Image: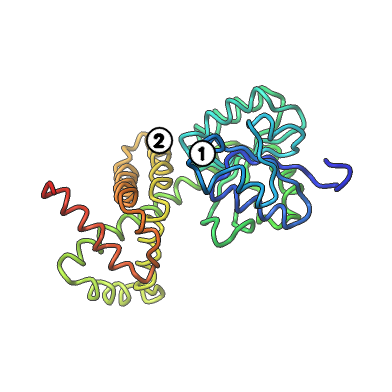
Amino acid sequence: MDTATNAIRIALIGFGEVGQIFARGFLASGRHEVATYDILFGDTGATTTSPERAQEIGAKPCKSAAEAAKGARVVISAVTAVSARDVASEAAGYMKPGQIFLDINSVSPDTKRANAAAVETSGASYVEAAVMAPVPPHGLKVPILLGGKAASQIAELLGPAGMKLEIGSETIGQASAIKMCRSIMIKGLEAITVECFMTARRYGVEDTIVASLDQSYPSIDWEKQAGYLIGRVVEHGRRRAAEMREVADTVASTGLEPLMATAIADRQDWVADVVAEQPALKKATDTEWRATVDALSASLAAKTSGT
């Protein structure tokens, strides 16, 4: 704790969209100072994830995760699902007793348990966090389910800044299991919506489908919902695909073949591939979902025809 400002230092490992939103929230609360490190800090081509962006926000950019974690009470891992285990393994080498590693990554219960085992060799505490809604637009107030013996300490340290934290089980993996199971439904709806309306649009029946869904589920505005779900895949498809592969591992651990989870990951990745080729798709609003679907279909047709 900084004796001059009485602010609790937080280290953010990962300074992408979530890391930046959290940094702004912590700093705005006046209760925390923030140090951060991201592997892209060394990439001169990275414009949205950079030391300069950290400085603009008011966070201290660091040259390594170890530097960011020095003197921090809480170290938050907010990286991609594929990097989560490496970050935890590295943290085992620099964290100290009295520090808490908060793992907010969307990974399987087995990965969370492995991460906990690695971190705890340092004498530091490990808390898993399951983020239960999109961080934007909730920001720091996004609902988060905590797991682990030090969960109550995290709630006491970060709750006053405005975080919406719920303490779950002390058993590592429970919170992640809830997140993984929920993602089958949420990310599945997104993938199904893409397939449904790409096909419906091809046959010119999308308005009829919207009307039919409105009749079957009158509490949902399907014109609006279709745009929202398709938009989320366009914006975050790659990240969602990585999470769904963690979901597939979670399903497979039960002995059940993860047919749906794998297919969802593949569809999310496919959309992400198209968006990588046509980044302007990210500029489309949710109300323009028909044009987005047409662009996805045109990309498919071009590849199918070999042009």
Q: Nearest the camera: 205 or 293?
A: 293
Q: Nearest the camera: 23 or 249?
A: 23
Residue 265 is drawn in which quadrant?
A: top left
Q: Residues within 10 Å of mark 1 (few under 14, many from 20)?
A: few
Q: Is residue 219 left or right of residue 70?
A: left
- Amino acid type at circle 1 is Thr
Q: Residue at x 66, y 52 (%)?
A: 57
Q: Residue at x 75, y 43 (%)?
A: 153
Please say which color scheme the image uses. Answer: rainbow
- What x and y, as percent, mark residue 90? 59, 26
- What x and y, as percent, mark residue 123? 72, 25
Element type where label 1 sits in the image:
loop
Q: Residue at x 64, y 32 (%)?
A: 63
Whole-angstrom CA distance, mark 2 to mark 1, is 35 Å
Q: Is residue 207 left or right of residue 36?
A: left
- Amino acid type at circle 2 is Asp
Which residue is disc 2 drawn over? 249
- What x and y, as percent, mark residue 8? 79, 44
Quadrant position of the N terminus in the picture: top right
Label disc, if present, on residue 124 of the rendered structure = none
Check contact, mark 2 vs mark 1: CB within 8 A: no
Which residue is disc 1 drawn over? 44
- What x and y, as percent, mark residue 135? 55, 55
Up-down relation of residue 218 to residue 184 (above or below): below
Element type where label 2 sits in the image:
helix
Up-down relation of residue 15 to residue 205 (above or below): above
Residue lying furthest left: 305
Q: Is residue 11 left or right of residue 138?
A: right
Up-down relation of residue 13 to residue 232 (above or below): above
Front disc: 2 or 1 = 1
Residue lying furthest front: 44
* First along the sequence among labels 2 and 1: 1
